[in-house]
């Protein structure tokens, strides 16, 4: 089958599984986020903590990729990565980001915008030791976002580090750690029929969350 523009123009779903009213949404968007995340986990959504992370370079050019949420509280949303990666360099120059969670089975998405800060070294180390050993080695072995000659280069470096680290504790590399996205806007999106989706939006204004409804 060849995917044509005509096929794409006619490819659509009419969402009808749920509704979202202002009265259904907690006045604290972090609490509401946790409710929806719990629902996604209970519904056995594949990788419910997967989120699109969008950053921008100093020229304003956007960049996006999927990362995994590894913590959420009243302070914000946490993820971990290589500080020398493309995203790390972009966040150093421009410490703002957007996150998107999309759970198609539930016909829901959550959009988040906010400022970004590095987590402290102790917090990053505490998470690093909980990772599988292979993932720890991978964090050391991979020069993330840099050009490498081939796959073999990466696998040989991994195997070398693995042999050297047998029966040893693997230290978190200095170039690896966590970030927290401190939200200034959070939107809850529920798909509805005829593209008349429900959009409940929160903005953090003068120390408080203000809840409004947006047109789809």
Image: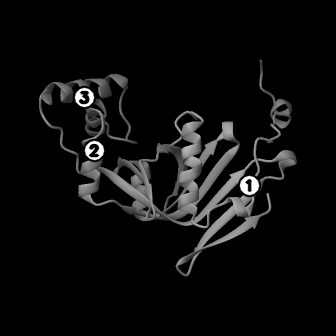
Name the residue nearer the viewer: 213 or 36. 36
Seen in the picture, residue 169 relative to 175 is either above or below; the reply is above
Left or right: 21 as drawn, with respect to 195? left
Q: Position of residue 117 (x, y in %)?
A: 39, 63
Residue at image position (31%, 28%) is: 154
Residues under labels 1 and 2: Cα distance? 38 Å
Which of the 4 image quarters holds residue 32? bottom right
Q: Earlier in the sequence, mark 1 or mark 2?
A: 1
Dot 3 crowding, Cα within 10 Å, few <14, some 14–19, many 20+: some
Residues under labels 3 and 2: Cα distance? 20 Å
Q: Nearer the viewer, mark 3 or mark 2?
A: 2
Secondary structure beneath dot 3 equals helix
Residues under labels 1 and 3: Cα distance? 50 Å
User: Residue 97 — which label?
Assistant: none
Quadrant the N terminus occupies: top right
For the question of whether residue 60 can be seen, the reply is no
For the question of whether residue 20 can be seen, the reply is yes
Left or right: 165 as drawn, with respect to 75? left
Residue at mark 1: 20
Quadrant the C terminus occupies: bottom right
Secondary structure beneath dot 1 equals loop
Residue at the limit of the structure toward the bottom, as seen here: 206
Residue at mark 2: 128
User: Residue 157 — which label?
Assistant: 3
Q: Position of residue 8 (x, y in %)?
A: 80, 34
Q: Position of residue 77 (x, y in %)?
A: 46, 56
Residue at image position (75%, 65%) is: 213
| Contact flag, marks 1 and 2 (Cβ < 8 Å) | no
């Amino acid at each position: 089958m060849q995917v044509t523009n005509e096929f794409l123009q006619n490819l659509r779903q009419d969402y009808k599984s749920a509704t979202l009213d202002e009265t259904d949404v907690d006045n604290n968007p972090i609490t509401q986020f946790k409710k929806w995340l719990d629902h996604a986990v209970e519904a056995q959504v594949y990788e419910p903590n997967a989120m699109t992370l969008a950053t921008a370079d100093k020229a304003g050019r956007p960049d996006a990729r999927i990362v995994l949420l590894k913590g959420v509280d009243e302070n914000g949303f946490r993820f971990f990565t290589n500080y020398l990666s493309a995203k790390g360099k972009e966040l150093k120059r421009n410490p703002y980001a957007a996150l998107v969670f999309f759970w198609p089975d539930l016909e829901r998405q959550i959009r988040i915008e906010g400022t970004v800060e590095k987590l402290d070294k102790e917090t990053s180390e505490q998470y690093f030791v909980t990772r599988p050993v292979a993932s720890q080695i991978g964090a050391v072995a991979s020069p993330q976002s840099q050009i490498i000659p081939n796959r073999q280069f990466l696998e040989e470096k991994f195997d070398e580090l693995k042999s050297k680290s047998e029966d040893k504790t693997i230290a978190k590399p200095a170039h690896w750690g966590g970030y927290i996205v401190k939200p200034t806007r959070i939107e809850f999106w529920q798909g509805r029929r005829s593209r008349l989706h429900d959009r409940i939006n929160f903005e953090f204004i003068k120390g408080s969350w203000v809840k409004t409804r947006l047109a789809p």
